Amino acid sequence: MALDLPNEMSLSRVAMKAELLDAETELKLAYAWRDERDEAALHRLITAYMRLAISMASKYKRYGASRNDLIQEAGLGLMKAADKFDPDRGVRFSTYAVWWIKASIQDYVMRNWSMVRTGSTSSQKSLFFNLRRVQARLEREAQASGEELDRHQLRQKVSSEIGVPLRDVEMMEGRLSGSDFSLNATQSTEDEGREWIDTLEDDGAQSSEIVEAEHDREALREWLIEAISALNEREQFIIRERKLREPGRTLESLGKELNLSKERVRQLEAAAFAKMRKQLEEKSQEVHDLLS
């Protein structure tokens, strides 16, 4: 079922005019939806408690989201509650729905508070919605008792009060202390002011690094060609078939072609690698001597 009413005002009007369900009627509707998937019963159940969803949504306006969006999220939470509600548990639907409505609204607020993810764990969510209120209360209590709290002491008290790690308090305080701004905003009011994005360091490879890397790759390629060329014909064949093909051939298949045992092919491969390694090490030493 979707919230397909045209706008916030019509949704609110419908909610205010909705019937108030007694416990018996509520239970019948819940059973009809759970057991028979009766959409008319679902619609009646949700419409009856949309007033509750709107009331809860209105409490979160201070977080910057539009009231209409908050109401839509509250409605989604209400529908989730209706879908998961078990009437056999003996709990009123309104009591059960409160948790789902609140969770849906809070998840929406946290997703849209900042382009940077604010957090999703239970401790982070508790901090997000309670940090400022708890801080204000603790500061009032300290002032009333003549106590002076520095920022660290206040954070420690908040950590103890809410039951979350101190590092989470410090992280959330930092995230809530400022808002997002565009990297394309200028650093000054001048027309030719530099944009903030221009101050970000480019973490990509610099031109000089690219040229050096390309030069090194080409040199290594030439060394490898030279090292392979120093091998005899059979050794070259084994190295080429084993390491320069995709996929490389097995020792057994090469042994059959060369009329050798698998162990003998392995020995020849190891000997070829030893020759190549020795030649490459000599080249490396030549470069070292040249530069030193």
Image (cartoon, rainbow, N blue to C red):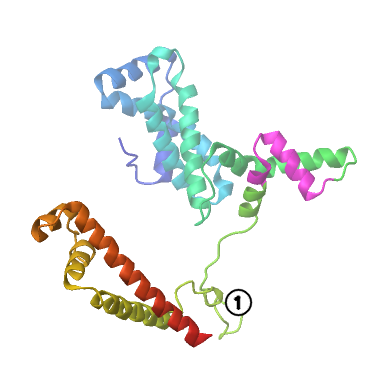
> Magenta region's main secondary structure?
helix
Residue 159, relative to residue 237: is it above or below? above
The quadrant where residue 205 appears: bottom left
Amino acid on which disc 1 is placed: Gln
- Range of magenta residues: 149-169
x and y percent of residue 118 in the render? 54, 49
x and y percent of residue 284 in the render? 42, 78
**x 24%, y 56%: residue:** 266
Check if residue 157 falls in the magenta segment.
yes
Residue 35, relative to residue 179: is it above or below? above
- Local packing at callout 1 (Cα closer than 10 Å; few below 14, some 14-19, many 20+) is some
Front residue of 232 and 137: 232
Check if residue 100 falls in the magenta segment.
no
Q: Give the side of residue 184 with respect to residue 82, left or right.
A: right
Q: Where is the C terminus found, in terms of image quarters?
A: bottom right
**x 56%, y 40%: residue:** 125
Q: Give the side of residue 78 with respect to residue 166, left or right.
A: left
**x 42%, y 35%: residue:** 77
Q: Give the side of residue 58 with respect to residue 134, left or right.
A: left
Front residue of 148 and 102: 148
Which residue is disc 1 drawn over?
187
x and y percent of residue 200 in the render? 54, 73
